[in-house]
Image (tube, rainbow, N blue to C red):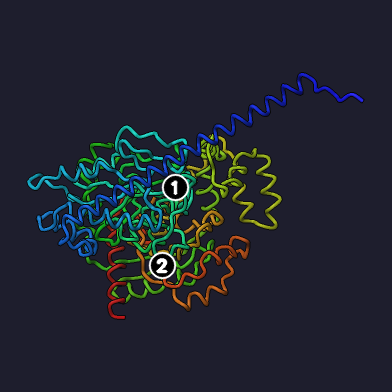
Amino acid sequence: MRAAVPSVPAVLCGSAGLLLLLLRWRRWRGLWRKVKEARERQERGLEQMDKAARAFRQQHPSVNMVSILSLSLPELSKKIQDGSLPPEHVFYAYLGKAVQIARETNCITEYLQESETQLQHTKPGEKKGLLYGVPVSIKDSINCQGHDSMLGFVKNIDKPVAEDSVLVQVLKRQGAIPFVKTNVPQSLISYDCSNLIFGQTCNPLLFTRTPGGSSGGEGALIGGGGSILGFGTDVGGSLRFPAAFCGICALKPTGNRLSKKGVISGISGQKSVTAAVGPMAKDVESLALCMRALLCEDMFSLDSTVPPLPFNEEVYSSTQPLRIGYYETDFFTMPSPAMRRAVRETKQLLEEAGHTLVPFELTNVDYSVYNFCMRGMFADGGATFLKNFEGELEKGNVGIFLWLVKTPNWIKTLLSWITKPFVPRLSNVIRSMRANTVEELWSLHNEIEESCHQFIAQWKKLNLDVMLCPMLGPALLIGYPAKLSVAISYTMLYNSLDFPVGVVPVTLVTDEDENELRNYRGYFQDWWDRTLAKAFSSAEGMPVAVQCVALPWQEELCLRFMKEVETLVMKKNMII
């Protein structure tokens, strides 16, 4: 019997399929080649840093690097300003420490080699800015001239930006020396810190825990002592998660208090949830010094959309007793035992110091999370977010999410209806991912604005100055943030409201916290609650923070409150 001869169309189809596979293989091979080149550049940068730091130590063996690294930013700045500490001593001290922390945590993506040139141009007699001679670290997504802003995407490798962001320009005019860029999660829309280009960044305090994200490289580097001042962004907690998880401080200002010109967003164009750029440091006074430096004429002239509001020293230095609202839970994400204890102990310290603490009742946080935050971020059905991944290598943990984004509205509606009786939170998340019409988006914006006015009205009815709130913690185990997107409720609320909010570490996880965690069930007792309990576990000795909140444009009052909390906690620890 004769064998069947394939028809011409079948042969052509088979050939087309092979050709398609070949083209796809070549494209993937090209992408991985770019990844390899980026990793090699990262390694070369670290080797250059190490070589430069070693050479300096050999030439200046009497310089006490440990002493320099122990100084706070205000102390360091004062010594540089008065000439008792040369800028090069500071620079190479931090260069060496940064390499060490990078080797341990994988937090640095690129060495800004021109920083050495900038250092050489610092002259003893020149006019000195407030950050003169201070080495600073910069999040990957903040543009630095001549360097990539990758956001964890291979397509952005070897695409150096043409000019510095306004933030970096002002930092340089204030005498600061940007010296490294730091790692982020792919797309920035995550509070972990991992991507396929540079891999996972670890928490410097415990390598099995995440440093948080998306400013996770900053959190790890500063938390490990490799940078004295760094800068990140925050659209749902991306400054506050790393600060809280790594035991440092951070300030998320009102969205437009600092310029975002030249700062790349994970979802460009969305306005429902307000992003901000802000500083991260070991202590509150360092954040205040940074804000003094940044809120200057250069900031206001380089970006005229930033309101010309210089730092209000009178508000920050006030010692008047505060009227402070507080809550222990948002009734959406059950706080860990350590989170609840952190708020209670801080409340007690504040009361003993003469401040008035007033209970604040949060309502409808679940509605805010689903409708304002998630629906607001993905109001186009996730189309803009999805576009970032076109022709891209992607992490496995975003695969399901990208599939959901790609599905048409009717399937999302059907899935939401099917899952509602069994997993109501998943049902609401799916529903929030539907594409909105323009009319629906405008209605949403109106609703968000009205909600903000209602929140402020409640605040003013209680005659509050500031608010004390829980902060998610301790640091979750690596890999868990991707499974726990709903746990952003404590942070993202204040992006939706666009309030300034800072994070201050106040306590450490105890044995007793760990024992109580065994009884953690959550408010919904669903898969997410069970997973969060696992993510919190085995964290004895890890830091736990609180959030300090003020009304819009009141960053100085927010910092003043943060300073009060920090001072009281330090006094308590000294007594103990």
- Which numbered disc, 1 or 2, marks the residue closer to the eye? 1
Percent position of residue 413, x then y:
67, 44
Horizontal arrangement in the rendering, residue 55 relative to residue 558 (left or right)? left
For disc 1, the marked residue is 198
Query: Residue at 57% across / 38% down in the picture?
Result: 436
Q: Which residue reaches farthest right?
A: 1
Q: Is residue 72 above or below residue 149?
A: below
Q: Earlier in the sequence, mark 1 or mark 2?
A: 1
Can the viewer see residue 252 in this picture? Answer: yes
Q: Which residue reaches farthest top?
A: 8
Horizontal arrangement in the rendering, residue 225 relative to residue 407 (left or right)? left
Percent position of residue 377, x then y:
50, 44
Horizontal arrangement in the rendering, residue 481 relative to residue 425 (left or right)? left
Horizontal arrangement in the rendering, residue 123 relative to residue 90 (left or right)? left
Can the viewer see residue 439 in this picture? Answer: no
Label 2 amino acid?
Answer: Val
Q: Which residue reaches farthest bottom?
A: 576
Number of residue marks: 2
Dot 1: what SS?
A: loop
Check the picture and name the quadrant holding the C terminus: bottom left
For disc 2, the marked residue is 544
Dot 2: what SS?
A: strand
Percent position of residue 184, x then y:
42, 48
Q: CA distance from mark 1 to mark 2?
A: 28 Å
Label 1 amino acid?
Answer: Phe
Label number found at residue 574: none
Q: Residues within 10 Å of mark 2 (few under 14, many from 20)?
A: many
Check the picture and name the quadrant holding the N terminus: top right
Q: Which residue reaches farthest left?
A: 125
Foreground pick, 294 / 160: 160
Foreground pick, 18 / 55: 55
